[in-house]
Structure formats: structure tokens, C-alpha cells
């Protein structure tokens, strides 16, 4: 993205800021793409074993008399039931799936000789995909936060260097 497009954007226009894509791969951008790949992978999974045949009908129908009886029920319980009934599954686009397929192999390809960096980069990417911070990743790795941050940054920089060397197109 060029600087002209960013200069044309104003925060009070009501439009979200355009995504900045650097001119070449760097560590933070690789980390962002890895987290997006993990998030896409989570959205693709079906959440357990196959269920077999199922129908699309609700578990029960709410009739007028039932609705009147429920009016006296606790309001919080009604909100929870409504939220459960209105749950929708987010399905990733074809472009997101393609980017996920490309990015998900980067740590193994470029960090295979460095198991501690591989584990740190993977754990941080999973935590970022779940909107958690580096503290959660360091707890899972059982190492201090500064070490988790350093290993993650080193690993992401090594992946970025490998992507540049292999002339992988930036997205």
C-alpha cells in the first residue's frame, strides 16, 4: 500500500484505516499473518467428532403461551438462550484459506533446526489468534515473558528472512 492511500484516510470519516502492508516481509508482519492463519484454522474446524445426520430445525418451538410464561422468567436467562439460538458459524473466505495454507507451514519450514524458536513462534501465534497477550504464551511455554518475546521475535525475523530469500509474495 502506498503512502498516498494512507494520507487520504482520516479517522473521523467513519471508515476503518486501510491495512498497511510493508514493502517486504518483516518479523511483525509475519507474526500477524501467522496469527490470522491460526484464527482461520480455528474457524475451519468443526469442533469435534462428526455428528452424523442432523436437522436444521430448532430444538423446540416457542408458542404464544410459552412466550407469555417465559416473560416472568429471569431476564439474564432469556438473553443467554437468545444468544445460544442466534449463534452463527464464521466461515472463512477462499482467500483467507489460501493464505492460511501458505502461512501455517512457515515455522516448520524455516525454524525446523531451532526447536525452541519453533515452539515459541507457534505458541505465540496461537495465543494471538485467541486475542491473548505474550503473558499467556509465556505461561504455556513455562518461560519468562522477556525470553518468550525474544525467542518469538528471533523466530519471526528468521521466517521473514527465509520468505524474502525464497521471494514469497507479500500479502
Image (cartoon, helix red, strand yellow):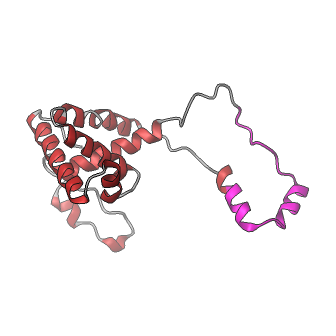
**Quick one: which residue is furthest to the right in this view?**
65
Q: Is residue 74 magenta?
A: yes
Is residue 82 placed above or below 112 in the rendered structure? below
* Residue 86 x, y percent position in the rendering: 65, 51
* Residue 58 x, y percent position in the rendering: 74, 42
Q: Is residue 98 left or right of residue 29?
A: right
Q: Front-most of 148 and 74?
A: 148
Query: Residue drawn 57% across and 29% down?
Result: 49
* Residue 166 x, y percent position in the rendering: 11, 32
Query: Residue drawn 30% across and 57% down?
Result: 134
Q: Which residues are magenta?
A: 55-82
Query: Residue drawn 41% across and 38% down?
Result: 41
State which quadrant residue 117 falls in.
top left
Q: Front-most of 77 and 101?
A: 77
Is residue 95 placed above or below 79 in the rendered structure? above
Is residue 26 placed above or below 9 in the rendered structure? above
State which quadrant residue 162 falls in.
top left
Q: Is residue 33 magenta?
A: no
State which quadrant residue 38 falls in.
top left
* Residue 114 x, y percent position in the rendering: 16, 37
Amino acid at each position: 500500500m502506498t503512502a498516498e492511500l494512507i494520507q487520504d484516510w482520516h479517522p473521523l470519516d467513519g471508515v476503518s484505516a486501510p491495512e498497511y502492508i510493508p514493502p517486504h516481509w518483516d518479523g511483525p508482519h509475519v507474526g500477524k499473518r501467522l496469527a490470522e492463519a491460526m484464527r482461520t484454522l480455528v474457524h475451519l474446524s468443526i469442533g469435534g467428532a462428526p455428528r452424523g445426520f442432523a436437522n436444521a430445525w430448532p430444538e423446540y418451538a416457542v408458542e404464544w403461551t410459552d412466550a407469555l410464561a417465559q416473560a416472568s422468567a429471569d431476564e439474564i436467562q432469556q438473553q443467554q438462550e437468545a444468544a445460544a439460538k442466534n449463534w452463527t458459524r464464521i466461515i472463512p473466505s477462499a482467500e483467507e484459506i489460501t493464505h492460511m495454507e501458505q502461512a501455517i507451514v512457515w515455522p516448520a519450514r524455516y525454524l525446523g533446526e531451532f526447536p525452541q524458536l519453533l515452539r515459541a513462534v507457534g505458541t505465540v501465534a496461537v495465543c494471538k489468534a485467541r486475542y491473548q497477550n505474550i503473558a499467556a504464551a509465556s505461561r504455556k511455554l513455562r518461560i519468562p515473558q522477556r525470553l518468550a518475546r525474544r525467542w518469538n521475535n528471533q523466530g519471526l525475523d528468521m521466517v521473514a528472512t527465509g520468505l524474502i530469500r525464497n521471494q514469497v509474495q507479500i500479502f
